[in-house]
Amino acid sequence: MSEIDNVTGLPNGVALLSILENLQPWSALPTGFAVHLVYIQHPRQGKVRHPGDGADAILIEVARRLRRLASSEDIIAHYGNDKFLVVKFSDEPVLRGKLFAISLRNELSMPIRLDCGAISVDATVGTVVHADDSGTTEMLLQLAEAALHAARCEREVDCNCCYTMSLPYSIENDKPAQDLLTAIKSRQFLLYYQPIVRATNREVEGFEALLRWSSPEHGMVPPSEFIPTAERTGMITPLGSWVLTEACKEIAVRSPTQCIAVNVSPVSLENGDVATDISTALNVSGLEANRLAIEITEAVHLNLTNSVARQLNKISDMGVRISIDDFGTGYSSLSTINAIPVSCIKIDQSFTRKITSDSTSKIVVQTILEMADRLSICTVAEAVETEEEASIMTGMGATALQGYLFGRPLPAQAAFGNGQAFHAGIGLGVS
Ligand code: C2E
Ligand code: MG
Ligand code: MG
């Protein structure tokens, strides 16, 4: 009997059983694992299939996305008509398993382009985390089916996408991680937008997207309070993918010309596939690549390994600009400029704060601006709060300015509304 599904090229259900059997004894595996049973729903479902109706193309695309999300050592199978199964290996199967389930759903919910137009696929994921060395392959698959069933029932109530059968143990005592996971699952994040103005005429040339957590318990939580947890646990990767797509969609709808800057965590650059996330975001939103900039903090955190540098080069080759955020605060400012294709430098707010009172800061900023100018790199002065700071920075050659003087970060509706006023030259601070 064939063990390969001839539409997707993936192992089928029969092959999967023997692959899973071969994993036994589970206690001898070097890492833990989570099993994700994915059920897809789409408008072509339930109809009699015939070649060219798109049903096969949907399965092929789903298989392609699963391959992209999984690592080479993970197992992917086409487990029956509209079901796929992914076995994801990890040292932290509970947390990673939950995050992976969220990524699966996000990735699969992106529209699929067919000859007859784009189609939306709805994915539900049932996850079983293997937390106990006892058990059989059969039990594992039964649990996965039960998890999927629970996820589908639950979804009808509160749109939950992932259901995990074995309860978390590794994040049981990690309250910040638990809260963040709940927040991701219940979509409690939103983006604020802050204008960036051209220094010479104060016109809004773009916006920076800044993440906020709207917590039912704590109100609007700033990124400084949750990004560290997101980075420590790896949750920054699904969160960062969402930010990219959301920000690109918003600017594409709101403005035909302005640009959007999105902060990308060094953790995502080191562990995730930011280049693919960017290309998905551009595809889904229809935004031109040259209207997107990613901001990376050059501070000590950015470990410029070959793979990070390769990824940044790939992103730059796509036409997306790369900005170095908080420039001047790390140890590696100058070597960063040398190693990656930098389009823009954002001068850290600590310099802006001191520019009117401290002559050394002024000399440092002047030197950075002159260097950037000679390298044809644009410059943004961050956190400009007063006219005096704005005019000193402009006089020294900063090409753009950002700060409360020109507008605070605000939800999309309010931020883009203000953008119109700035176009008319009304550059007043918004409080
Ligand atoms: P950042 O990228 O340097 O963003 C600028 C920060 O300065 C923002 O803080 C902004 O609200 C604040 N700011 C802007 N103008 C002024 C001003 O005139 N005065 C003062 N005092 N502050 C000003 P926020 O929104 O709290 O973000 C803090 C940091 O969190 C960001 O620094 C960025 O590193 C990180 N962050 C924000 N959103 C994201 C995201 O989506 N992903 C990642 N990985 N990091 C993010
Ligand atoms: Mg930034
Ligand atoms: Mg900054």
Image: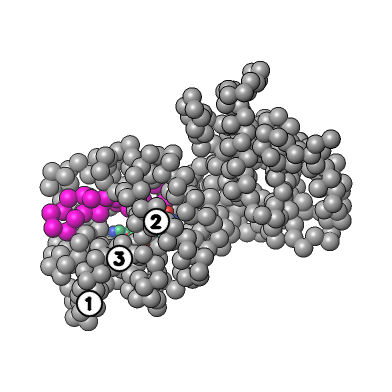
Considering the numbered disc 2 on the image, is that residue within a helix, a strand or a loop? helix
**Hey, what amino acid is under mark 2?**
Asp
* CA neighbours of label 2 inside 10 A, class few (<14), some (14 to 19), many (20+): few
Name the main secondary structure of what is drawn in magenta: strand
Q: Which residue is mark 1?
A: 367
**Magenta stretch holds residue 201:** yes
Q: CA distance from mark 3 to mark 1?
A: 13 Å
Q: Taking 366 as reference, is 212 left or right?
A: right
Q: Residues within 10 Å of mark 1 (few under 14, many from 20)?
A: few
Circles 3 and 1: CB atoms closer than 8 Å: no
The N terminus is located in which quarter? top right
Q: Tell which circle, 3 or 1, labels the residue nearer the N-terminal end.
A: 3
Q: Is residue 375 left or right of residue 94?
A: left
Where's residue 96, x and y in %?
A: 64, 54
Instruction: Please determine whether, in this image, residue 106 is positioned above or below residue 404.
Output: above
Q: Which residues are magenta?
A: 190-211
Residue type, mark 3 in image: Ile
Mark 1 sits near ligand 3, with its Cβ under 8 Å away: no
